[in-house]
Amino acid sequence: MIFITTGSRSFQFNRLLKAVDEAIEKGLIKEEVFAQIGLSNYKIKNFKYVSFMNHDEFNRKIKECDIVITHGGTGVIVNTAKAGKSIVAVPRLKEFNEAVDDHQIQLVQAFEKLGVVVACHECSSESISNAIELAKTKEIVPFISNTNVIIDSIDQFIKTRM
């Protein structure tokens, strides 16, 4: 199963939902698809969806799926990577009123360099289906948090200033 999550912020991501819907219609995506669409208002024809899910339902979908298609949000990418799932990341863009700026482009590029996601910068039915196929064969790179490194650096900085 493919699980799409568009985030829970106050922005739509109709462009992604439409591309997946068209890919299913063209037969480019044959797997079952389920989405959490947030505030998107695109009229989906070819897969099941809900607007929002509670934390437990969301985590259950992450466990059940093989691939997650998501926006370029750090939280969902990190949590999905920690769950050992393949990720296709599509950055939200300001020009489509999906975000206040284009910071998700840089986030997706950074996660792509780490090998954590398959980036999909062109949001079309063909590019989405190609990214899914790549994600199926890509080795899943476990995400290793550097939180302790950051905390140790701050601790060292404070100690040298005392």
Image (cartoon, rainbow, N blue to C red):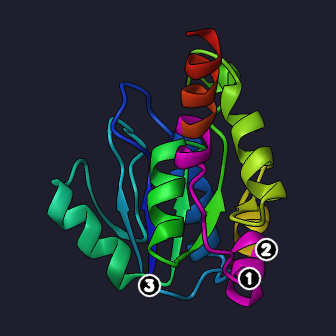
Is 123 or 9 nearer to us in this picture? 9
Image quadrant where residue 39 sits: top left
Q: Residue at x 75, y 36 (%)?
A: 105
Q: Name the spot of residue 112 as percent of width and height, x first.
A: 78, 57
Position of residue 109 measured from the top left corner of the image (x, y, whole percent): 80, 46
Q: Earlier in the sequence, mark 1 or mark 3?
A: 3
Give the magenta range: 130-151
Amino acid type indicated by mark 3: Met
What amino acid does circle 1 point to? Glu
Q: Who is closer to the viewer here, 71 or 55?
A: 55
User: Label 1's element?
Assistant: helix
- The reply to whether dot 1 and dot 2 touch (C-beta < 8 Å) is yes
Residue at position x 79%, y 74% in the image:
130
Give the residue furthest to the top.
Answer: 161
Q: Toward which corner of the image does residue 135 lie, by quadrant? A: bottom right
Tell me, for residue 133, which label it has, or none: 1
Q: Residue furthest front?
A: 162
* Few, some or many residues within 10 Å of mark 2 (<14, 14–19, 20+): some
Above-or-below relation of 50 to 133 = above
- Residue with the mark numbered 2: 130
